[in-house]
Amino acid sequence: MKKEQISTQFYEVNPHTMIIFPKKSGSIVYSEIYEVDSHYTSKFTPFELIKTSCNFFGSSYEGRRINEIPKKNILSKGCLYFYYYIEETLFM
């Protein structure tokens, strides 16, 4: 697995994205991004990455969130599997 430096470019969530972890450094929150064979660090928060990726693929974060809530126990494609983790870790 190769590791890259903190990226100033925006990361696009894709089919190879496995998980996005929040990483705090002082008062700044970064994103640790793990793909199948790569590891990246982004200067953007996980929420910013997910929200922008939803918009990039023609959806809104709010629309995806509302659509995902009734079927949260069913495995389906969506950018919302990160939502619950982000809510619990960053806003406590």
Image (tube, rainbow, N blue to C red):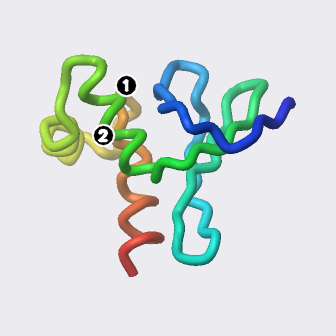
At a point 59% along the width and 44% down the height, the residue shown is 42
Q: Quadrant of residue 51?
A: top left
Q: Secondary structure at mark 2?
A: helix
Which percent across, then down, holds residue 90? Answer: 43, 70
Query: Mark 2 — residue?
Result: 51
Is the residue 31 above or below the residue 53 in the image?
below
At a point 36% along the width and 65% down the height, the residue shown is 87
**In this image, 38 relative to 83: left or right?**
right
Q: Quadrant of residue 76?
A: top left
**In this image, 2 relative to 6: left or right?**
right
Mark 1, Cα crowd under 10 Å, few <14 / some 14-19 / many 20+, is few
In front: mark 2 or mark 1?
2
Label 2, label 1: how far apart the Cα atoms are:
15 Å
Mark 2, Cα crowd under 10 Å, few <14 / some 14-19 / many 20+, is some
Which percent across, then down, holds residue 77? Answer: 37, 25
Which disc is residue 56 wearing? Answer: none
Compare residues 28 and 68 and report the one nearer the observer: 28
Q: Secondary structure at mark 1?
A: loop
**In this image, 21 relative to 39: left or right?**
left
